[in-house]
Image (cartoon, rainbow, N blue to C red):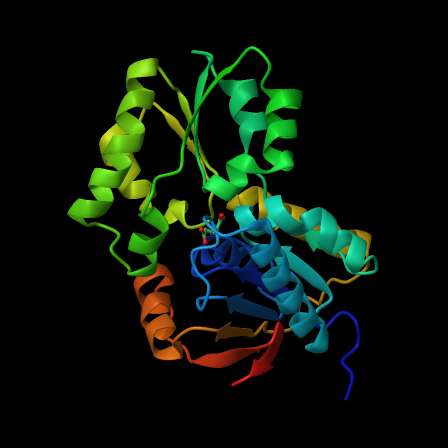
Amino acid sequence: MRKNKHQRPIGIFDSGVGGLSVLREIQGGYPAENLIYIADQAHVPYGNRSRYEVLGYSEGITRYLLGREAKLIVVACNTASAVGLTELRKKFPDLPFVGLEPAVKPAAENTSSGVVGVLATPATFQGELYASTVERFARGVKILQDTCPGLVDQIEESKIDHPETREILEKALKPMLEAGVDEIVMGCTHYPFVIPLIREIVGNQIRVIDPAPAIARQTGRLLEQFDLKTAGDNAGETRFLTTGDPIKMERQLTDLIKLETGVSKLIWDGGILRDG
Ligand code: DGL
């Protein structure tokens, strides 16, 4: 039976568990909404993959979510947004999308030192979206970038408070500190999970920007704009699916967002996503 449009779920996806940093904000802000979260862990990390690959995965996931009657899609991945958001909007013109881009604008507006640090994946830095954001909003601001090699993998392994994770972050952040950054942008949705460690390294004087609350608010605005909001008395349900190992993801949900729940398996079948 088709659900009425308000009850239809919001689809949220990422290469892995990074998008959970966005999901928890959406759950908190809009608890009545039904959510479907897809982690494409068969392909994580996306950050070193080609544009062609990431586009294909993003499209396959979007088609699957449409099959589940998604009313709106949150691309909870900077990499997939950088590579594919424009294409996705063209391919699915009737479907509202919320995408992510590194929060360079608020950082550039706020900086007193004129030096801003951005942590994101190689694919995000190479995308046109990032270049145009820097060009439009950060003229005259010095931007220091780092791809934090290996950090996504550490977070996927739940190695949050871990010597190797600290080493990766110190390597990225120390040169930024020496250059006088006062704003650090989390340009990858995995990275907010290591903000406590980042704080230990940079102290409390520097602003660390996690875009998730702003993304949740933008999701709410689109729900209003397209008249898609679920009635407030609904107890929203969230379903989790992975193209990787469901048992592993169940552990990750407990480790990262303190949630004990089941995860279902999805299988890639020649570019098409099917229930496993
Ligand atoms: N969490 C993603 C992002 O925001 C993807 C990281 C990756 O898979 O490389 O960029």
Residue ID at (61%, 29%): 131
In percent of width and height, residue 116 lies at 45, 21
Q: What is the tally of numbered marks visible in this picture?
A: 0
Q: Residue at x 61, y 54 (%)?
A: 52
172 shown above or below 213: above
Depth order, front residue of 51/15: 51
On the image, the x and y values in percent for residue 39 come to 49, 66
Between 71 and 17, the residue placed more toward the observer is 17
**Residue in the picture at 37% in, 51% down:** 152
Quarter the N terminus occupies = bottom right
The image quadrant of residue 45 is: bottom left
The single residue placed furthest to the left in the displayed view is 163
**221 on left or right of 38:** right
The quarter holding residue 71 reads bottom right
Q: Position of residue 50 (x, y in %)?
A: 54, 51
Residue sitting at x 76%, y 80%: 3
Q: Give above or below for 243 relative to 211.
A: below
Is 8 placed left or right of 39 in the picture?
right
Q: Can the viewer see residue 37?
A: yes
Tell me the quarter of the picture where residue 130 sits.
top right
**Viewer-proximal residue among 263 and 136:** 136
Residue 102 in view: no
